[in-house]
Amino acid sequence: MSPPVPSDLGYVPPDGGWGWAVVFGASVSVGFAYTFPKAFTIYFKELQAVYSISYSQIAWITSIMCATTYGGGPISSILVNRYGSRPVVIFGGLLCGIGMISAAFCTSILQLYICVGFITGFGLALNLQPSVIIIGKYFLKRRPIANGLAMAGSPVMLCTLAPLNQFLFDNFGWRGSFLILGAILLNCCVAGALFRPIRAVPASVKPQVTEEGKDALKKEVTEEAMEMSSPTNVPMENKTEEEGGKDCCEKINQYLDFSLFKHRGFLIYLIGNVLMFLGFFAPIVFLAPYAKHIGIDEYSAAFLLSILAIVDMIARPTTGIIANSKWVRPRIQYFFSFSIAFNGTCHLLCPLASGYTGLVVYSIFFGLAFGMVCAMLFETLMDLVGAARFTSAVGLVTIAECCTILLGPPIGGTLIDTFGDYKYMFIKCGAVMVLAGTFLFIMNYYNYRMLAKEEKERKAKEEDLKSVRTENEGRNNWNRETAQDGPELEPLREEQEGLKKEVNGTNEL
Amino acid sequence: MPAAFSAKRPGRLPRLLLLCLCLSGGSPADATMTTQDASQSLASSLTKMQAGLTESSPEPMTTIQTANWPTQGSPSDHLTLGHNGSTPALLGPDLTTQEFKQATKENMSNVTFVEYEVLLPGVSGTSMEKNITLDSATIIELSCRLDNKYSHLKSLQVTWKRGNETIRHIDKTENSWSIQLKILDSSKLGNYRCILKGEEEISAIFYLQVPKIEGKEKPIVSYEGDSAIMICKSFGYTPIAWTWYKINGSEQIAINDSLVADKYVINSVSANVTHLKILKLTKEDDGVYWCEAAFELGRSKGNLKLKVLSLMVPLKPFLAIVAEVVILVTIVFLYEMYSKKKEKCAEDEKEFDQVEQLKSEESNGLENSSARNRKI
């Protein structure tokens, strides 16, 4: 199996230090983005009574919020590509806060749709994507752990937001709660402040000695780059040099990399995930109603969800640690496919669970599987496309997933209504996920083999190039020796080596 | 998003079945309900529910009784409890003709017949209780039965009492005693006790009451200038009318929405639910409210509490959290500037050292090259 894709960012990520503060900020952001729609359902009953509307009309609020959060992905990606993560998250936090504060003064359901649905939803979109992106910029070797910890923010936030919402509602009514929730969402700005932009510092450059030396070095660098660049992949430094020669496609690609649709790994991930999300969220939505349907009382049914959240909380960082181990990291795509299939099997076995104990066991396994999938959701995408193109990839993936995420629970609901039985919904979800897992497994096996083949071809080409280059180098060095001093050659050679590594990195894509 | 699906509402029949559980614990396995058409001109049916232990006879005891008076409508089959058909009532054979005539007069209204039985343990001390909810005029038979295994207890004196008043009872069987009551208004509701005096005293209490109204335990919170909605629900039983009261200290004031039209709006979404919407709230609207449901047999109240807050109340935590956010963001940025400065200082120092080092190397190199040149 091929080793993990080396960094194509142009620098070596720190893998620690300030990175852990970034992980904490990311977990806060991700937590708010995923759990806010769920925790908001506490207000439904009251809002229904106040505005005299039906349940489906009020449920539109969370639907719009989720749709905007996922649909705003590409816009988020474009903004991050242009401005970096930090300003986008701070702006997103402000937007969320403004949305909820204005919702506190709403007088009609339409205004609620706009304030809570669109504005807050878009703010959460501007929170979610940059948080995931910046982890790829700060971590490489420990990236799965960082991803696992950041995604663990979601169940932690759910466990705190749900009781907090209830407390706020009991003491301040719904208007006061919205006001205070707006302030709480402003904490995303704090998370954003932690996202210190990381400078692309080339790893192997020694501090420059003199101005002359620097200029000469730069000339050599660009010359070597142009010699060694392959026709398809352009090294990052070259882009800035050849700005004039870009056409409009490349300009769009700078903001949102549509060339990803030619990327084999990206396409595999996209198809597999879009299929998976069709059955991902529906079981959570219907777990409590199913429990009540088979005769369990309301509090025990709610407790099932708490069990799920707690197991989820533990599963995510643990999965991150496992995925980071040297046995799993190279084969992380298989691990991901396995966890999806495991999730699907849980759902298929759920109808066999009888009574409360059976459902508790199901909740535990479901929580475990859910955590495993979520922890590796973005890690696998980063692994496939590399951290540099991940910004655009995540935007494109979320907008594609948006449709199936929104369709999943209503389809499940229709199945329940048509057959009057929950087991068909579980069977549908389980079947879809097992199918997605199998698809990903097979396609990733194919992908790994193709990558290994390409690696072999590239190495062979490099051998040829090396032999040609050593000849040239010999000639060049003999020319330069008369002009420059001995010690100054050192940085030059190091620079050549560094460039070679970088170009190899981009070639791997 | 969760699709709306209707949960199955338990029907009245299974609910009443469960009500009639004998309190020593038993499943309603032996409860049966059968109806039968008696004859062409008369229609009658008796719904009888009897809960029993597994020891007791599993045979369903169904009796059909007919009454000898012309019925109002066409013969109908079912007489299920609480059902509003114009069906005639049945009277037990031991009622006097006077009551018989009275019953015919009340023939027009919906009078139902219900029977409840409690199985008594032989041991004293534990008092058996049963809550019975009635919403319309009913003829009810309450019976206490002694378990067969205690039939050895002789010389038992059985009394039925309501408060201090003794009621004449009938010996249904060897081991059971019952009373029949005609509940037509609230005066007949209350607690009825059957007392068995032997060596020890064994008793059971039947609580006859009107249906309870569900209000809200937690206070409803709203703001000045905003509106508030209070909802009262009655489960299972449909009241005749709803009235809302506001409690001012010790007096209750009826809320009439026609008088102050733009302040109170009362509407009923369905017969079992009532909404009171209070507009343009002020501090005076704060307090306790009662929603009263009028049933045939009396009134029942639900309690609701309204809290009216000023906008300052949530504003304080809001401002506190905003201040916390601003402080944290400032701290993060300040720390970043500080660590950048430190880095820059360290870098400058390093560069300075390196420059010195290279300069010395240069001078060495120059010396060497000049040495080389000289050598050449």
Image: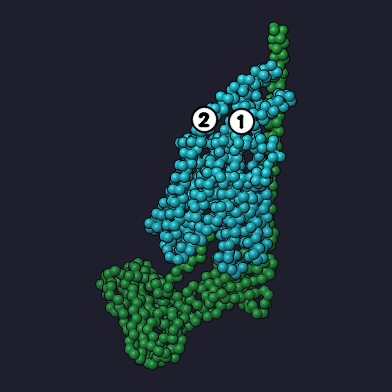
Chain colours: A cyan, B green
| Residue located 34% across and 77% down the image | B33
Q: Which residue is mark 1?
A: A228
User: In this picture, is B223 found above or below A17?
Assistant: below
Which callout, 1 or 2, points at the residue further toward the start of the chain? Answer: 1
| Residue located 67% across and 27% down the image | A220
User: In this picture, is B87 found above or below A12?
Assistant: below
Residue A460: image tag: 2
Tag 1: residue type?
Answer: Met
Disc 1, SS: helix
| Residue located 29% across and 69% down the image | B54
User: Nearest the camera: B350 or B96?
Assistant: B350
Tell me whether the residue at label 1 lies in contact with that at label 2, contact meaning CB atoms closer than 8 angstroms.
no
How far apart marks 1 and 2 lie (CA) works out to 15 Å
- Does residue A498 appear anywhere in the picture? yes
User: In this picture, is A117 found above or below A230?
Assistant: below
- Count every numbered label the image shows and give the total: 2
